[in-house]
Image (tube, helix red, strand yellow):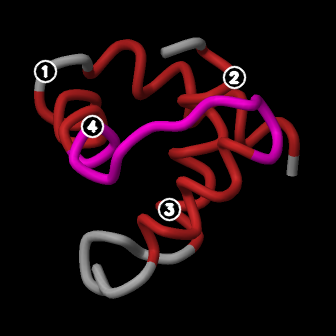
Amino acid sequence: MSFGEMLEMVDILNKADYDRKKAKIMAKVVKSLHRNFGVRRSTDQLRKRWSDLKLREHEQYRRIRTVLQKSK
């Protein structure tokens, strides 16, 4: 998964407060990634990637959040 794809995913999941509401947010992420990057990822793949970012890859998650904060 490229850095741009992860950036898009984290942006949507943080805006939608995914940790509290999990309803149809992943479908929105799947659509956005397909539209912007032309990639199809399953909701299970994205859910696992999100979990990995938050639990195991702290440094990369911090870098993504920094980029997102600078863009706002």
Rendered residue at 69%/43% (across/down)? 34
Disc 2 versus disc 1: nearer the observer:
2
- Mark 2 residue crowding within 10 angstroms, few (<14) / some (14–19) / many (20+): few
Q: Which residue is mark 2?
A: 4
- Range of magenta residues: 35-47
**CA–CA distance between discs 2 and 4?**
16 Å
Residue 21 image point, x, y percent = 31, 86
**CA–CA distance between discs 2 and 1?**
19 Å
Q: Quadrant of residue 58?
A: top left
Asked if marks 2 and 3 touch (Cβ < 8 Å), the reply is no
Of the image marks 2 and 4, the number of the one nearer the N terminus: 2
Secondary structure of the residue carrying numbered label 4: helix
Residue 69 image point, x, y percent = 72, 43
Asked if marks 2 and 4 touch (Cβ < 8 Å), the reply is no
Of the image marks 3 and 4, the number of the one nearer the N terminus: 3
Q: Which residue is mark 4?
A: 45
**CA–CA distance between discs 1 and 3?**
18 Å
Q: Which residue is mark 3?
A: 14
Disc 3 versus disc 4: nearer the observer:
4
**CA–CA distance between discs 2 and 3?**
15 Å
Magenta residue check for 45:
yes
Secondary structure of the residue carrying numbered label 2: helix
Magenta residue check for 39:
yes
**CA–CA distance between discs 1 and 4?**
16 Å
Rendered residue at 48%/61% (across/down)? 13
Disc 1 versus disc 4: nearer the observer:
4
